[in-house]
Image: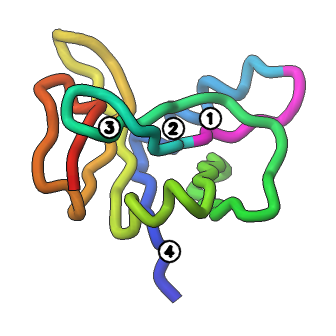
Amino acid sequence: MAEPITVTERAAKRINEIVASEKQPKALRVSVLGGGCSGFQYEFSLDDAKQEDDVEVVRNGAVVRVDSMSMLYMIGSEIDFEDSLIGASFKVNNPQATSSCGCGTSFSI
């Protein structure tokens, strides 16, 4: 069965680099919140506890957790990590998004 979201090799590598310095095992939590300039926005945080309704995706040891409500807005998405001249950040390539803002952290459906 295919995963509801995918994590790129670059994103998995960066997650592993970030959590390597943590005392407790951590995962990258991705949430969808109301707000932002396009209606919804992504929130990224470190998380040490899996919730009952979480969808968990593992790639090369890197763990990404998404709660079930956020997953409704993210099915089919790819989580990537970009390191460019304007900065380094996680990006969500979401096929459900009909538009997004210039910074790439907010979107509409």
Q: Which residue is mark 3?
A: 91
Residues drawn in magenta? 23-29
Q: Is residue 85 above or below residue 53?
A: above
Q: Is residue 22 above or below residue 5?
A: above
Residue at 44% across, 54% down: 7
Which comes before the other along the chain, label 4 or label 2? 4
In 3D space, how far apart are the residues under numbered discs 4 and 1 (Cα atoms)?
20 Å
> Depth-wise, is mark 2 or mark 3 nearer the camera?
3
Residue contact between numbered discs 4 and 2, judged by CB atoms under 8 Å = no
Quadrant for the C terminus in the image: bottom left
In 3D space, how far apart are the residues under numbered discs 3 and 1 (Cα atoms)?
16 Å
Q: Which residue is mark 4?
A: 3
| Residues packed near mark 4 inside 10 Å, few (<14), some (14 to 19) or many (20 plus) | few
In 3D space, how far apart are the residues under numbered discs 4 and 2 (Cα atoms)?
19 Å
Q: Position of residue 38 (x, y in %)?
A: 20, 36
Which comes before the other along the chain, label 4 or label 1? 4
Q: Which mark is residue 13?
A: 2
Q: Position of residue 32 (x, y in %)?
A: 45, 44
| Residues packed near mark 1 inside 10 Å, few (<14), some (14 to 19) or many (20 plus) | some
Secondary element at image label 1: helix
In 3D space, how far apart are the residues under numbered discs 2 and 3 (Cα atoms)?
14 Å
Which comes before the other along the chain, label 3 or label 1? 1
